[in-house]
Image: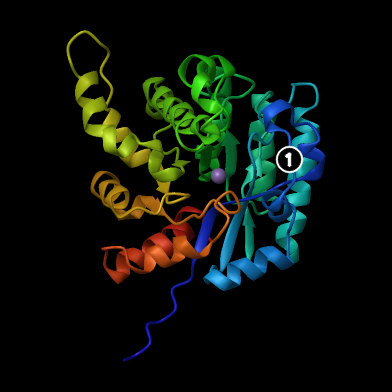
Amino acid sequence: MMKKPHVPIIAIEEHYYDAELVKTFQGPEAAKGGPIDERLYDYGALRLKEMDEAGIDIQVLSHGAPATQKLSADVAAKVASGVNDRLAAIVKANPKRFAGFCALPTAVPEAAADELERCVKQLGMKGAMIHGTANGEFLDKQKYWPIFARAEELDVPIYLHPALPDPRVTEIYLADYIKDFPLVARPAWGFTVETATMAIRLVLSGLFEKHPKLKLILGHFGETLPFLLWRIDSALKRPGGKQVAFRDIFSKNFYLTTSGFFSNPALLCCVMEMGVDHILFAVDWPFVMDNKPGVAWMENVPLSDEDKAKILSGNAKKLLRM
Ligand code: MN
């Protein structure tokens, strides 16, 4: 049998840690050590070895949560620019294997917009990643819109990544289950609720009427929203509320990744709602500790080779201009 031509694999939600930034993390978000941290702080040998073992050609690197979203306004811009300069150096050391999403000082939105522009134009970053709320505020508040305006102008996406939900939400919804199921407040459910709420609020805010070319990325197959799109859209159209083209906006302006979610039913639901051009491959390494299962799953997904190639790298090349 003829060997299939190699399809490059670009994984776009792959994390690292910057020691200076991690020093600012507090409480449950502080670093704990262990094999995940060992990988987060590895910018070369171990990372590349595990990419090679799985056949991943390029990682688009982003910081781990909460990145720069909990910094106060007086230090955020300075800390973020240092983080981004150091990320640019990591990418520059292995430019064929790494690309980057910058971190933004969301506490100072105008400065964050300028930092996005600097990172894209001067450091070659592919966009930005924002982790959860900005010091407790959802980003649909108009004071954050300069960041989205600049992303639209630069034609780069912003990746909305989860962070720990507001402690009040966790307390009411999940606190009594955290002892036995610590991950329920994190990827098993808490992250999903937080990030889906962020996306819903952004659509309801009118942001996309003002910035129709804005591109946002959600990980984890869109944090449940593709499955719910029809219902959200139809419920919002019932009498009594303002009209919003929820399903149209979501499926046009949002892109989804496979990060930490290697499921055929979830994939097919997303393809049906969003179209294959809006789905991009990611592992979520090293929080998903092994690259191989995600790549192996993609080999056998029930899609054509052309569609698989789009998900594995074709869509990333277009969206991130790689
Ligand atoms: Mn992640």
Q: Residue at x 59, y 67 (%)?
A: 51
Q: Find the residue positioned furthest to the top.
A: 240
Q: Is 175 situated left or right of 114 in this image?
A: left
Determine which quarter of the picture holds residue 199.
top left
Task: Name the spot of residue 266 as percent of width and height, x first.
Answer: 31, 48
231 shown above or below 159 = above
Find ligand 1 in the image and state its quadrant: top right
**Tag 1: amino acid:** Lys
Residue 96 visible, this angle: no
State yes or no: Cβ of the residue under disc 1 lies below 8 Å from any atom of ligand 1.
no
Which residue in the structure is indicated by mark 1? Answer: 32
Task: Name the spot of residue 46 as percent of width and height, x first.
Answer: 70, 65
Q: Is 302 situated left or right of 131 in this image?
A: left
Q: Nearer the viewer, residue 102 or 179?
A: 179
Task: Name the spot of residue 243 as percent of width and height, x first.
Answer: 25, 18
Q: Nearer the viewer, residue 169 or 255?
A: 169
